[in-house]
Image: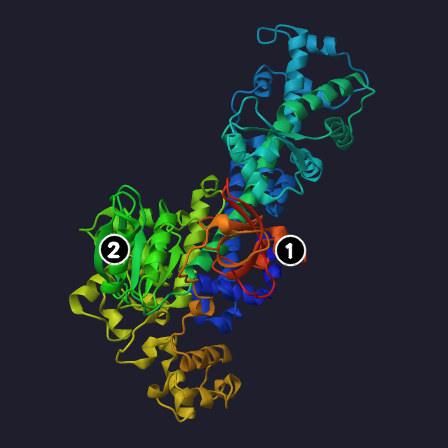
Amino acid sequence: MNETLEETRKQLGLEKKQLETVLGLLADNTVPFIARYRKEKSGGLDEEALRSIEEAYRYEKKLAERKEQVLRLISERATLDESLKQAIRNARRLSEVEDLFRPYREKRRTRGKTALNKGLGPFAERIASFPVLFEPATEAATYLGPRVQSVEEAIQGAKDILAEQISDRADVRKLIRSRFNRSALLCTSRKQEAEDPRGIYRMYYEHEEPIRRIKPFRILAINRGEKEGVLNVRFTLEDKRLIDELKRHLQVNERSVAGRLFLEALEDAYRRLLKPSVVREVRRDLFERAEERAIEVFKDNLRHLLLTPPLKYKRVLGVDPAYKTGCKLAVVDVRGRLEKTGTVYPQTSGKSLDEAIKEFKDWLVSNRVDVVAVGNGTASRETEQLIAKALKATSEDIRYTVVDETGASVYSASGAARREFPDLPTEMRSAVSIARRLQDPLSEFVKIDPRSLGVGQYQHDLTQSKLTSALSFVVETVVNQVGVDVNQSSRELLQFVSGFSPSLAERIVSHRQQHGPFISREALKDVHTLGKKTFTQAAGFLRIADGTEPLDATGVHPESYPVADGILESLSCTKADIGSEKIRKALKQTTPQTLASRLDSDEATIEDIFKELMEPGRDPRLEAPDPVLRTDVTSLKTLEKGMRLSGTVRNVVDFGAFVDCGVGVDGLIHISKLSDAYIQHPSEVISLGDVVDVEVLNVDVERERLQLSLMRSRTPTA
């Protein structure tokens, strides 16, 4: 078993047999399906654990394939001795394999290769043997001819060959890489006359830090500062001490003439070849670790964003604020269906303030609006103030909230938006999206590339293929955890159902439009190309309300319907009792262990069926706090140090969290102000979407900055 897979097994605390079982399951099933419906075989592993195993296995497979390729290439170009063969077989990382293969690579035209072509290889070997009797000039003279014009050229050529041979040695590279990772400093400075008007990189103008301790987000910040031409970046190390260590490692005999020539080649190898190469490798490794951490933060934030609780059964007025082009308004009913659109021009129409307030009030009352969702883009603050005044002018119980509209413009110009609202202008589609992302965030967010949702750090600096894969996995996981109403969901949501593809989602929607709603899960088999295997992977995650089979509205998989029937019979209940107080009381009188052997099932499956019978189709998003709804506006100017506020966490980053307290700008809770105890990352105590109580530490009106501290217990808020 490869080390990567073995490390994953140990981290997850798995037995080898369990790991082998999981790998077998992954060969034929999706991760969501295994996590939800094969708990008894996987040992109850969640989606993240299963993905870790899957990725470790892919790495092992890639490593094995590369080993075979390298062994073949070496055997074609040179004699493959047994020791090298064994070293490659035993390599635990791709980097180790590449180091061993390095001397046998096809090289471009180099100084060492040129010297070899001149026939100076034997001379280099002679020097490397450290002969006692050795006269460089005399021996070099034997190589003079048409290709070598002088003694100096011969000696230099031999040293060039030795320098490249030293730099290609896997043991030498490993030693230098280890010393760099342990002792090197990363140093940054500001480039002369570099422009940084907002002082974004101020802390890195004169900065040095051991690379073993540098935080991941600093690596990404430094890389971006260098890319933007603001920062110089260099690595420092005690070169002389490292060269001395290399001398001891290679057992250089400095007392001999040949040894001194070899030492010159060694120093040249280190400064010209090894150090620049290892610096590139170290920077790449630092970036990869920082990238991995940034992607994990992005994933965690996205997961919490997608799990934002829906505001069900509310008529919502979505408002996309603007100055010159006016505020776009869209009213959606309790199911998110668009009812009315319009535009008001409170900023540019020349109307009085009272007239603008009345116009908003008329919209609220005539359309029976329950909640107003105001986008947080341009003119948001002014529009929010008008909405608050319009609410006061009504006798209705209407509230508003500011919705992060990041990505709304991306959606409004997308193919999904054009298909859904072909006759609406782009800006009006944004207003619809703002309203719907309050009603059912998940259904709306899946229509947008998750990279455009603004919940990560340095996303444009990351490897986009890695980021896309990681975020798609999060979307798929959340969609299947929540479940999908097959008769109401868009093709964009359906495509993330376990086993489904975009084309199959399209066919399901088309079938639904042509033949009407699906009356059962079984009826899905009538959809073209939806075969038995796909049905098995998907069925449990699909919900059909008011269908012919009550269990179709739950998370019970069709393969377990006989078990569910057996449970109901043992409880003297019927399917009509699902979700009732009667069945809840009955279930409390028994245990999964009691029924497992009797129904020829396993405890994990029966326990899950119990939950579904008590709360059919329960939405896990409802466990999170509801959005903060307001009736009035608080201004940044009105805040004072020590004031207490309530707000919603909008983003979590390595150095803290940003909270929307309804004052126009998101306040920062630095990591040091999140907990009295030491924490390594803000996500240990706070998550995106949390509703929190905070204390104002500092207000900078001019720079529009707000510093906050997390209150550890709920207190009266401003």
Vertical position of residue 622 compared to residue 297: above or below: below
- Whether residue 80 is visible: no
Q: Is residue 378 left or right of residue 668?
A: left
Q: Is residue 64 left or right of residue 626?
A: right
- In percent of the image, x 51 and y 88: which residue is there? 594
Vertical position of residue 623 compared to residue 662: above or below: below
- Position of the N terminus by quadrant: bottom right
For discs 2 and 1, the disc positioned in front in the rendered view: 2
Tell me the tag on residue 679: 1
Q: Position of residue 549 (x, y in %)?
A: 29, 80
Q: CA distance from mark 2 to mark 1?
A: 50 Å
- In percent of the image, x 27 and y 78: which residue is there? 546
Q: Secondary structure at mark 1?
A: loop
In this view, which residue lies farthest toward the right? 255
- Whether residue 715 is visible: yes
Q: Position of residue 181 (x, y in %)?
A: 67, 39
Crowdedness of circle 1 by 10 Å Cα count: few (<14), some, many (20+)? few
Q: Secondary structure at mark 2?
A: helix
Q: Position of residue 444 (x, y in %)?
A: 33, 58
In this view, which residue lies farthest toward the bottom? 572
Crowdedness of circle 2 by 10 Å Cα count: few (<14), some, many (20+)? some
| Residue ID for mark 2 | 359
Residue 710's image quarter? bottom right
The kind of residue on which mark 2 rests is: Glu
